Image: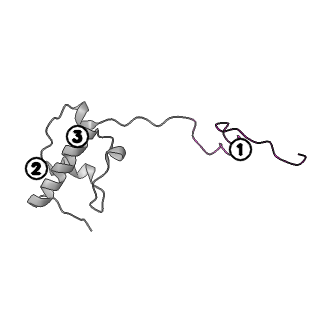
Amino acid sequence: MIGRAPVKKPGEGGSPERRKGKSLYFAKKKFCWFCKHQMFYIDFKETNLLRNYIHENGKIISGRSSGTCHYHQKRLTWAIKRARHMGLMPFISR
């Protein structure tokens, strides 16, 4: 067994040189803005609020990216789709 590298066990991690580029701190936890402000109803007529949760190309931002909880993400999606069908918001933006 001469010339063979030692076998690493699972969970040992990589070499310190390999881990240099990674950050040593945790990302700040995202929170649901609607839960914080105790908003139970998301109105589809508040287009300024809804535009914060849409990409430039018109896609709805996921709850994982925006930090909204599952309950409010469902209502947010419903409000954005309703505003689009009522003509208050565009389906796509150019």
Q: How far apart are the alpha carbons under marks 2 and 1?
A: 53 Å
Residue holding disc 2:
45
Q: How far apart are the alpha carbons under marks 3 and 2?
A: 16 Å
Residue 21 is covered by the magenta coloring: yes
* Residue toward you, 52 or 66: 66
Q: Are marks 3 and 2 in contact (CB under 8 Å)?
A: no
**Crowd tier of the residue under label 3, counting other residues whose Cα lies within 10 Å: few below 14, some 14–19, many 20 or above:** some
As shown in the figure, which amino acid type bears the numbered disc 3?
A: His
**Residue at x-position 29% and y-position 36%:** 32
Residue 22 in percent (x, y) is at 59, 43
Q: Do the residues labelled 2 and 1 touch (CB within 8 Å)?
A: no
- What quarter of the picture does the N terminus occupy? top right
Residue holding disc 1:
17
In the displayed structure image, the side of residue 38 where residue 55 appears, left or right: right
Q: In which quarter of the image is residue 36?
A: top left
Residue holding disc 3:
72
Which residues, given as a range, are shown in magenta?
A: 1-24
Residue 86 in percent (x, y) is at 9, 58
Q: Which of marks 1 and 3 is nearer the N terminus?
A: 1
Closest to the camera, between mark 1 and mark 3, is: 3
**Above/below status of 55 relative to 6:** below
**Above/below status of 25 relative to 51:** above
